[in-house]
Structure formats: structure tokens, C-alpha cells
Image (spheres, helix red, strand yellow):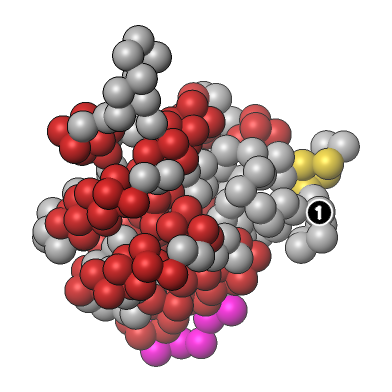
Amino acid sequence: MTTKKNKLPLTEEQIIKILTKNYSIITSEIEKIIDEILINQKNKEIIINEITKRSNLNNNTTQLIDGLVYQKIIEANDHQTTEQLIKQLPNGVINSKKFKNTNYQILQKLLIHKKFKEADKLTQKCLCEIVELKTKKKKNWLYFTDIQFVPKEDLFILDLLWKIYSKGKFGFSIQKKIWIKNNKKWDKLWEKIYWLKQGNMKRYPQEFMWTIDAPEGHLPLFNQLRGTQTLYFLFNNIEW
């Protein structure tokens, strides 16, 4: 990438500054900047080192930009760069050591490769398995009384994985923000996240969108056909 004035390439300090900004969502303008930075091999090395450093910290400093960069390097399939990335971050930008209660690595891989439909199913399965461990009862879906058995750290990791690999578009916390912005009106939430078709809940799975182009908050799905109580309790557990 070059500056408009003098066409000079960005310095390492400028690149790191771009990477360390706490974006709430990745816009097309930000994505374009990252695309231009990634043209240069040296810049790729700077970026890989920076996101690796953040991943190895234990204070959840991983940023949306990290997930975007990881996905772009994987998708570009540049052998040298991909090999370096995989060597330093074999599982993705979220350190698997943070998965204390459940192994979410398969979910992370699905989200890296934007397999959102499969990731959605696995997210529901993970939540049910967490509750099963606590209650010793088989679960195919969750009731509002089950949410108390989902540790907040698990909910945080699930939400973070969805946000990190969707440019900040998907996740339970994103849905909660939209819900609050619309005065906690459920019908408004369904409308804003495009879960309705002609006033009725869309049919699963064919009428939902399973790509990164889906509207903000569209994914993941959660008990959308079983009323609002469970989602209400889940939202109340989101404090970040």
C-alpha cells in the first residue's frame, strides 16, 4: 500500500497501528487497506508476527482484523506465506488454550473457511453438550432454564469465534446490540437480522443466508422457532 501524497509504502509502525486499532466491524474500506498491505511479502511477515503475538497472550486481545488477515492468507494459498502462518498459528487466531471446558477447534476451522451453515449446527451442538455435562440429560435444543448451565467463558468464546471470522457481523453479542437498539422488541430484531419473510419466520435451512454477505446479526441461529425466553436469558448472560 502507498500513501496518496508521495506513493511511499507504509512503514512497519504504520501497519502495526492499523492492526492494533480496535475495530467494531470491518468495513470494505478497511478490507481494501488490508488487501493492499498483503501484496507485499515483508508486510505479510509483519502482520503474521503481530497477530501471533496477540494470540499468545492470555487476555483476549485478539482483534477482528486478525481473523480477516488469517482468512485472506489462507484463501490466497501463497505456499510460502501460508506455511509460515500455519507454523505459527496452526489452529487459527484464537489460542486453543483458551478452550478450557470444551474443544471448539472444529468450530474455529469451519468459521475460518466460512462454512457458516456447518458452524451454526456445531454451535448449537456445543451449547447442548455443555448443558448435558452439567445436567446429565440429553439435549437436542435448549430451554431458558438451561442457560444457567452455560459458563460465561464458553459463551464468550463462541461469540468471539463468530465475530472474529465474520468481520464483526455475526455473533450473539451482535444480535443483542441490535435487539437493544430496537428497544428490545423481538419482532424488530427478527426484521433487522432478516429472520422473517413476509412477516413469518423463515424456513430452516433453505431460506436463511449462509455466506459472509448475510446481514449483520443474521447468524448464528438460536432457537428461533421456540419462542424468545431462551434467547432472552442468553442475552442477559452477555456482559461484554
Q: Position of residue 108 (x, y in %)?
A: 42, 68
Q: Residues within 10 Å of mark 1 (few under 14, many from 20)?
A: few
Image: 187 above or below 91: above
Instruction: Give left or right: position of 225 versus 239.
Output: right
Image: 95 above or below 18: below
Q: Residue furthest top?
A: 5
Amino acid beneath label 1: Glu
Residue at position x 30%, y 23% in the image: 8
Image: 212 above or below 71: above
Residue at position x 27%, y 49% in the image: 42
Instruction: Give left or right: position of 32 versus 197.
Output: left
Image quadrant in which the N terminus is located:
top left
Q: Decide which of 129, 64 is in the foreground and name it.
A: 64
Q: Decide which of 220, 228 is in the foreground and name it.
A: 220
Residue at position x 15%, y 63% in the image: 56
Q: Position of residue 145 (x, y in %)?
A: 44, 65
Residue at position x 70%, y 34% in the image: 191
Tell me the element at label 1. Answer: loop
Instruction: Give left or right: position of 203 versus 143.
Output: right
Magenta residues: mostly which secondary structure?
loop
Q: Where, by quadrant of the figure, is residue 98 drawn?
A: bottom left
Q: Residue furthest left?
A: 58
Q: Decide which of 24, 126 is in the foreground and name it.
A: 24
Query: Does the magenta portion include 139?
Result: yes
Image quadrant in which the C terminus is located:
top left
| Residue 143 visible somewhere in the drawing | no
Q: Position of residue 85 (x, y in %)?
A: 32, 66
| Residue 101 visible somewhere in the drawing | yes
Residue matched to label 1: 207
Q: Position of residue 125 (x, y in %)?
A: 52, 76
Q: Residue furthest right?
A: 198
Segment colored magenta: 135-140
